[in-house]
Every structure is written in C-alpha cells, then in structure tokens.
Amino acid sequence: MVVLASVLGVFDISLDKLSNGELWLAQFFRGLSDGATYASVALALVMIYKSTGFINFAQGSLALLGVYLAYIFSVEQGLPVALAVVCAMVASAVVAAFIERVFIRPFPPDHVLPLVIVTLGLLLIIDSAVGIVWGFRTRSLPSMFPSGAPIEWGIAQLTWRTIGNLGTVFTVVGLLYLLLSRTKVGLAFRAVSSNLESARLVGIRVGPTLGFGWALAAAIGTLGGALVVPDLLLEPSIMLRVLIFSLAAAALGGLDSMVGAVIGGLVVGLARNLLVTFLDLSELALATAVAVILVVLLVRPTGLFGSTRVERV
Amino acid sequence: MSSTYLEVRGLKAAYGDIQVLHGIDFSVDEGQIAVILGANGAGKTTTLRALCAMVSTEGSVRLGGEELAGQSTADIVRRGVAHVPQGRGTFPDLSVEENLMAGAFVRTDADVRADIEQWYETFPVLGERRTQTAGSLSGGEQQMLAIARALMLRPSLLLLDEPSLGLAPMITRALFEQLTAINEEAGTTMLVVEQNAALALRVANQAYVLEAGEMALSGPADELAADDNVRRAYLGY
Amino acid sequence: MRGLGVVPAGSRQHRRRQIIGWALFALVVVLIPFLIADTYSPTIFGNRYTVGLGNLSQAIGMMVAILGLNIATGYSGQLSLGHSFFVGSGAYLTAVLVNEFHWSYLSTLGVVVPGLFLFGVLFGLPALRIQGLYLGLLTFAVAAVFPSIIRLDEVKDRTGGSNGLQIESDLVAPSWAPLNTVTEWLHAIPGVGSRVPDGLTSRQEEAVYKYFLLVIVALVCFWLVRNILAGRVGRALVAIRDNPLGAAANGVNLAAYKTLSFGISAAVGGVAGTMLAMHSGFVGPDEFGFAMAILLIVGLIVGGAGTLHGAVVGGLAIRFVPEWSSQTQTLPGTDTALEGPYGTAILGALLIIIIFVLPGGAAQGFRRIKARLMPVAPQPPRG
C-alpha cells in the first residue's frame, strides 16, 4: 500500500481522480472520439502501405490541404459543413491522383527509398504551400455533427460528435471493405499489392490502380482531418501531431490491416486520453505514441493484425 | 501445316546496360506447342518477358498478323497472351477463387463463373481450397493455380516459364498431360521454356535452342530430339 | 569542353593536381572568413542577398550533422528520419554542462561524444529488429517527440523548457590568435584587400574565431569519419547496405556493425549539436524538432548520400537556400516576395528535383564535371 502510494505520488496521481467513475467514462468517450480520427488517418496510411509497400509521409499534408479546402468551402463559401467536407475529399483526391501521376509513377514501384524521400519533399512543399496561401493564423472549422450530447452521466457525455466520429469511421471501413472485396477495382487493388508482376500479367493497369489508391487514401485522410480539427484549431502544423498518433495506430494495427488501423486508432486515442488525465502527462502524450510504436515494432513487428511478410535478412 | 500465329523478328532485350537478347527470330504455328531450350542465362525467361513487354525491347512481335511491339503489357494481355512467370505466378494474399477471378480481369463476358468451376474440375485440389489464400498452398498447387489463373484469360497464346520448377516428377508429368489436353481441346498455342528438355520435346511440336541471347538451333521437336548436339547438351545421353 | 587532358592515376601530374586542389581548398577556407567578416551582400535582380559569416558557421555545423546522418543512412542504408534527436541531445548536453558545471565548449565534447555514442548504440539495438520503413517510421516519431521531452515539467528547470536556454559562455579569441594582424595583411593586398576590413571589431573577431574553431572541429570529424569508412568498418557497412545476405554469408556481423554505425552516427550528430550550440550560444527545443530531421535528409540527398563532400554541399544548401529565399523581396518579373515558408517549399522542390535528375546528388554532378575537365586514366595493373 505504501509502495502504491509512493508510485502514485511520483506520477502525481490522486486517488480521488482514479476512483472517479464519471471521469473514467468521460475520458473513455473522449478517447473513442479522438481514436476515431486517428483511425481514419491511419486507414489512409494503410491504404498506401498495402498497395505500394511504403509509408506516405505526405499523408498528413494531403489531409491538411483537404481540411483547409473544407474550411474554405464551408466557412468562406457558406456550404453546409458535411457537403464542404465531401467536396474537399474529392478535391484532395484529385490532387493526390495528380501527385501520384507526376511524382510517384516515374519510379519503379519496388524502389522504396526514393519514393519515401519524394513523399518527404511533398510534405515540405504542401505544408509550406498551405502556409503561403492561408497564412499561420488559427481558424476554427465547425464540426459536421450537431453539438450537445444525447446521453449524459454527470460529466461523462456521449456527444453527438463522438457518435458521429465513430459512426463515420465504421462506415468508411465498411465501405472500404465492400469496395476491396466485392468490386473489380478492389480486386485490382489487392492484386497489385499482392504481386505486382502477376498483376501486370493479368492485364491490370498498375499505374492507374495505384493512382486510385492515392486518391482514395487522400479522401479518407481529409475526412479524418475534418473529424479531428473541430476539436483543435486549424493551423498549418496541426496534422503533424495527428500523423504521429496515426502512425502509432497504424503500427499497432499492423500497417497493412484496415481493421487493425481502426482498433489501433481507438486504442491510441483511449490510451492518450487516460494517460493525460490520470498521469498528467500532457507533454508526454506524443512520447507515449512513440513508445507504442517502439514497443509494437520490437515485440510484434507485424502489429496486432498485420500479415507476416517474408523479409530477406 | 497450320499458319504462323506468333512471329518474332529481330527481338532484342536489355536490362539497363546489359543486352540479353541480341536479335532473335522465331515463330510458333497456330495451335502448336513450341519449346525453348537453353542453358541458364541464355535469355529464355527474358524472351517470354519481352513478348509481354515486361522488359524494354526492340524488334517485331506479330501475333496473328498484328504488331505487338510498342504496346503495354496490359494491352498485350487484352490480345489474349497469358504468361505464367517462373516460380511465383499467383497472388499469395488472395484466395484461390480470387486468383482465378483476377486471371479473368480483362474479360467482360458472363462465362467467368463457369470457367472457374471448370478449372476446379480439372484441378480438384484447387476446388477443395477455393477460400484458402494462395500463399498457403504447396508449391505444386501454386503452380497449378498459376496455370489455371493464366487460362482464365481464355488465352490464344500461353507462355509458360519453367512450369516444372520445383515439382515432383509425377506431378510434372501430370501437368504436361493436362497442358497437352488443353492444347488439343481449346487449340491454345503454347510457348514453353523448360529445363526438363526430354519431357518438353516429347509434348512440343516445334523447338528452339537459345545460346547466349542468340537462336542457335530450330526445327521440329522430334528432329531436335534426335540431334546429337542437343541430345548431349540438353538430354544428357 | 576540352578539359585539361588525361593524366594517368597515381602519376606525378595527377598527384600535383591533387595537391593544388587541396591547397586551393585550404586557401579558400582560411581566407573566406576575412572576406565576409563584413557581411558580403551582392544585389541580384534588385534583391540584396547576404553571405554572412554567422550563416556559414551554422552551415558548418549542419555539414557535420549531415555527415553523421550519412553514416547511418548513406553508408549503411538505414533510413533514419530522427537524426535531429542526436543533434539536439548533443546541443543540450553541451548547454547544460557549460551552464551548470562551467565547462568550456570544446571540453563538453569529452562527454558528448562517448555519451551520444552509447545513446546511439542503445538506439541501434531496437533498430536491429526494425528494418527499412519501420525504422523510418520510428525515427520520424522520435524526431517529433524531442521538443516535448525538452519541455517536460521534470526537466524544464534544466533545459529552459519552451523558452530555450541561453548559454553563459562567450567565445573570445585568445590574445595569441593573430586575427587582426592577418586582417591587416590581407587588407594591404591590392585588389582582394578592398573586400577585407582594415581591422576587426570585437564582434567580428569573435565571429572569425568561432568560424575557425568550428572548421577545425569539422575537419577532425570529416577526417575521422573518412578513415573509419575507408577501412574495414566502411567496407562492412557498404556491404550490409548493398547486399545484407551476401555480407552475412561472408562473415560480416550484421548486428554489431549496424549498431556500431548508429553509435558513430549519433556521436557525430552530437558533435554537430555542440557545434550549433557554440555557434549561436543558445539552444531551443523547436530548433531540433522534426523539421530539422527532414532538413538533414534534404541536405543528405541534395549533397549526395554515401559521399563525404556531399555533406559539405548539403550543409551549405540547407542553410543558405532558405536564407536567400527569404531575402528575395521581388521575384524577377513578378512582385512576389519569397518570405517565410517559401524557403522550405524550395528545399522540398530541390529534394524532388534532385531525386529525379541527379539521384547521386551534387557529389555525382561534381564527379561528372570533374571527369569532363580533368580526366584521370585508371592505372593498368602491372603484369
């Protein structure tokens, strides 16, 4: 008991907090909501990783661009937020398809290192372009979902936004699952990610298929950004943090598993909120994400749901 | 004698700076089986890859009178050329059934389903494992799947790269019997690269010998099988 | 272009050319601080650009940082997007040692080098199990987390938290350093002399002295790394990068060498951190965040991964490109000012352009030009 008390003391934990069931529940809901947003950016990362075998470090930047477009469409042009987000998803998909065509396709798909470096260059360009065009002033993007909470227990609120975020992510995963398993373009996509050469030999046009993957990933990333930004303020560096948490989520889920990305996202969201609240580790929240990545990669490099790939050496 | 279906003139191919094929000529008659023999590194695999535009090439490749040179792999496949590459011709993460569906990717007709069932009958082991991923099959089963996948295209020309690689002799013989049967029933023209020269020469009508990227010998398969040099070099007696 | 004619490798003419080359290099390195002690500011298309000694000194620190990254990424092929973590650790270690224990800057290297080496080895141990992209992912996250570690409540008193840390030590040129005398001599030389001030202010003297200290540290680093890489270790690292299976089959202990490469890489990165702390007398958490990690990758690729002189070009590029970009008040033909984020965008574009047209970076470009101008015939083996 003394030991426990001293451990709690080190972390500045009060037993009052720990025994407060409503606080737990409140943080649980908030964690689910955050987790849903990480999950959707993680899904975008997984889409690219599945098809191309590399991590698109510009994924957060594409989402950033998308969210700014959503802001323009909704706040400045006066479209309803949901419609603005859909338009922004389409626009970022077009941009991503263009980027894939111009900057990515010239490289052989199995040359991973130059591709990763190109995505780093794109990250620098897109992030600074957003800064150039829209400046560094913070803005707020309204949420797609109504405010208020249909269910409340004291301070614990299950808000419409949490419900909306979760519902959106599960809908996206469901639609993606149907797309990939029931449609011809989904079959092409999975064939390309499974065996590039055989995919060519059955007549699949690999380039457009990957371009489609990029477009889809950008749209999903933009949606994720549109879910997360209403909780924060919109400014050019916002997606970096989200990207780190999403990378942690994707790594936890196994990088090539979509279900894994969603569960990973929820776990990271929950862990983050509980740690910040009960251990008072707000500065360490990012570090926690990094620790998650490290531990997962060490203990189980394929994540919780990833498939094992045979690696040379 | 039937008409020439595949006609190759002055085919060159290179990987970067390394020239592998130095302008080879050969042809395959419609409905026939042709075999390409040669030592390792002679350019056999490259020849098949060149026909599908999987390497950068020069020269003329005519299929049923139409020029293929300059077309993309995807377009060549749409002309009815199916290729079973060496070793890993399947999609390991997809189920057996999805592999077969991927094989019919460019087909738009309604018979795909029926064809899948037909190949399940021909290769019953695939029918038993239709929901398993291809990566979980044995080497022989994967080779069958790769061939069935290629045939799902209903190809007019089937390119086979070392179909017997890694297979037990019994299975190899059964496989070649299947291929002969398919050739007779569907009239599919086939071009086979094979290490097992004796077996290949037995099923083939025409034969070619590649040496260091040049066509060294050509002729009817039975004549080549009787040629002393071929016998010593490739048949080992 | 005709060039200078072919000389056989190892011949007297070839050696003479090499000696002349090095002598010219030494002359430039020695003269340049005096030439730009009064900040050199040419005007191009109506824009005033500056070539300041301070920026050059900072670029030298960046060169060493890129040199360190080069060992892990360029030579042994392990994608490290978190090199800024090592640089930042070195810088903060120096700052704390100077401030709290009143060490001199250079003596902190006695702690920074072994400390960061150990740190790098510890970091390299998980990296053994984590390959390629996964390593990139992990190091990327580590880079992003450095500033928040510095800002932690537990260490805020030491590190200065968000405000950064002013280092309480000045680098004053010792009285025996003949910097003013040299300046006067140079000033007396007709032609060149007009660019040199006829005496250094104390600020300028400090800047020139700092420059020479940094150059010496950098030269020692480059020399040591060159020797390490020219020997057994370097061959093993390149073998691991190009063909890990073959290297392992030939008895190269992959684990040991990979860990070692991380250790050396981190130690050199730490030295770069010390140098940057020396340069500015200040360390701040966001300087060493993920932006720097990417900047170092840009420098590595633009200069040429896997080459030593690539690090020099890379260091200059990542320091001066953003600087000059922000000084472009009017782009010719337009009235656009390239301030703020334009510099980063240009670096990003440079990175992509280099990957497309010159994958070997500037070093590859130099080799091509050199092969044109001063061809060297390889010596035929003696029979």
Image (cartoon, rainbow, N blue to C red):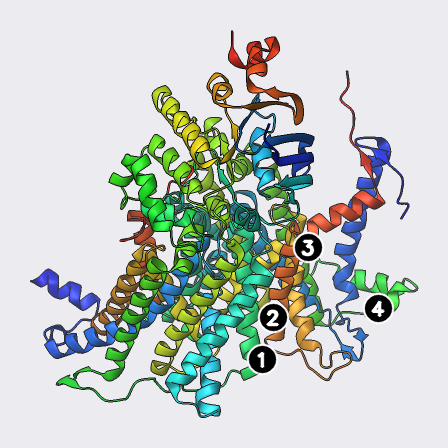
Name which of mark 4 and mark 3 comes first in the sequence: 4
Q: Amino acid at mark 1?
A: Ile
* Residue behind mark 3: C357
Q: Residue B220's image quarter?
A: top right
Disc number at residue C345?
2
Asked if marks 2 and 1 touch (Cβ < 8 Å), the reply is yes
Q: Which mark is residue C195?
A: 4
The front one of B222 and C20 is B222
Discs 4 and 1 lie in a common subunit: no
Please, what secondary structure does the residue beneath circle 4 have? helix
The kind of residue tagged 2 is: Ala
Above-or-below relation of A32 to A207: below
Q: Chain of mark 4?
A: C
For the residue pair B144 and C34, the one nearer the viewer reads as: B144
| Labels 2 and 3 positioned on one and the same chain | yes
On screen, residue C45 versus residue A103, left or right, reads right
Q: Which residue carries the number 1 mark?
A: A132
Task: Please tell me which residue lies in front, A272 or A14.
Answer: A272
Measure how far apart labels 4 and 1 are at the Cα level. 37 Å
Q: Are marks 2 and 3 in contact (CB under 8 Å)?
A: no
